[in-house]
Structures are given as C-alpha cells and as structure tokens.
Image (spheres, helix red, strand yellow):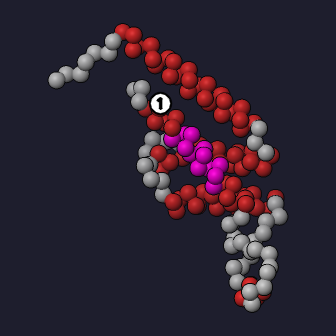
C-alpha cells in the first residue's frame, strides 16, 4: 500500500517545531550564562572538544559512544585545567588507612570534583548535540 499523502494542515507543523527548537537553544544558552565560573571555564574546553567531534559518522553520534575515547577527552580537559585548582590527589595506599585510622580521603589522579564536573558537562553537551543532530536529520 503506498504511503498516504500528508494532509494540508499538517504542513504547518514543521515551522512550529523548528521555532520550539530555537527557543530551547536560546533557553539553554541563557542557563549556561548562569553557570558558576569554574563550570563556564570547563564548558569552553568541552565545547571545543565537541566541535571537533561534530561530523557525520562521529563517535559522538554512535548509539553507544566509546567509553575509552570519552575518558581520553575528559583526561585531556582535566590535564589542561588541573594546575588552576588545588585538587586532592594521591595514592590509594596510605599507611594510616592500613591501620584503620581515620584520615582524609585520597583520590587517584583525575578522580576528584574537577574530573567529575568535566564528565557531567561533557555528557550533557554531547546529549544536547545528539538531540539536535537527530532532530535536524529527520527533516531531510
């Protein structure tokens, strides 16, 4: 059975959807302006990395992005930013912990608030771009 032609009144849905998408993008940009200073600085690096990955066939648009590649991106951003902050890092082995004494928690390299924040902002930005990519492709 051949596909049914689209009724005339349905032809007006496209511009409305496009306007909603533009309004969502403007809303997201306004919210990004309210990010704390550290998050805005991280976002600059994240957007730069996402710009490099935004092409047809990129791993960013894979159904299941490569976790090793994402960790590499997070590590490269982390390495560029880590000197600006006092970060709690150290070995997992500590003599005081071996004797079950209370001590300050130590983190392995990169596993601290900065690394976590980079991951969250990267995944959020990738999700936004993946949604935009999916929505753009369905119209042509």
User: x and y percent of residue 77 in the render?
Assistant: 67, 56
Q: Nearer the viewer, residue 51 or 16?
A: 16
**For residue 44, which quarter of the picture?**
top right
Which residue is drawn at the image coordinates 33% and 12% (left, top)?
7
* Residue 50 visible: no
Q: Main secondary structure of the magenta part?
A: helix
Vertical side of 126 occupied by 77: above or below:
below
The single residue placed furthest to the left in the displayed view is 1
In the shown orientation, is residue 87 left or right of residue 126? right
Binning the other alpha carbons within 10 Å of mark 1 as few (below 14), some (14 to 19) or many (20 upward) gives few
As for residue 64 lying within the magenta part, the answer is no
The total of numbered circles placed on residues is: 1
Residue 80 visible in the displayed image: yes
Q: Nearer the viewer, residue 78 or 117?
A: 117
Q: In the rendered view, tell whether residue 46 sits above or below residue 7.
A: below
Segment tinted magenta in the rendering:
119-130
Q: Is residue 106 above or below residue 37?
A: below
Q: Which residue is mark 1?
A: 136
Q: Secondary structure at mark 1?
A: helix
* Quarter holding residue 31: top right
Identify the residue shown where x is 52% and y is 62%.
68
Residue drawn at (82%, 58%), measured in percent from left and top? 84
- As drawn, is 102 to the left or to the right of 67? right
Check residue 122 for magenta coloring.
yes
The residue at 68%/60% (across/down) is: 115
Q: Position of residue 65 (x, y in %)?
A: 48, 53
Q: Quadrant of residue 91?
A: bottom right
Image quarter hosting the C terminus: top left
The location of residue 133, given as percent across then percent down, is 49, 36
Q: If the image is split into quadrants, where does the N terminus sit?
A: top left
């Amino acid at each position: 059975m051949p596909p049914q032609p689209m009724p005339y009144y349905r032809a007006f849905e496209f511009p409305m959807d496009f306007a909603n998408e533009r309004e969502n993008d403007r809303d997201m940009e306004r919210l990004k302006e309210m990010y704390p200073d550290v998050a805005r600085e991280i976002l600059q690096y994240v957007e730069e990395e996402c710009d490099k990955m935004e092409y047809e066939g990129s791993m960013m648009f894979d159904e299941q992005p490569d976790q090793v590649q994402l960790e590499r991106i997070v590590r490269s951003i982390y390495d560029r930013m880590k000197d600006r902050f006092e970060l709690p890092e150290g070995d997992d082995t500590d003599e005081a912990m071996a004797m079950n004494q209370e001590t300050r928690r130590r983190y392995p390299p990169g596993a601290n608030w900065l690394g976590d924040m980079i991951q969250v902002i990267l995944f959020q930005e990738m999700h936004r771009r993946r949604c935009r990519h999916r929505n753009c492709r369905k119209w042509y």
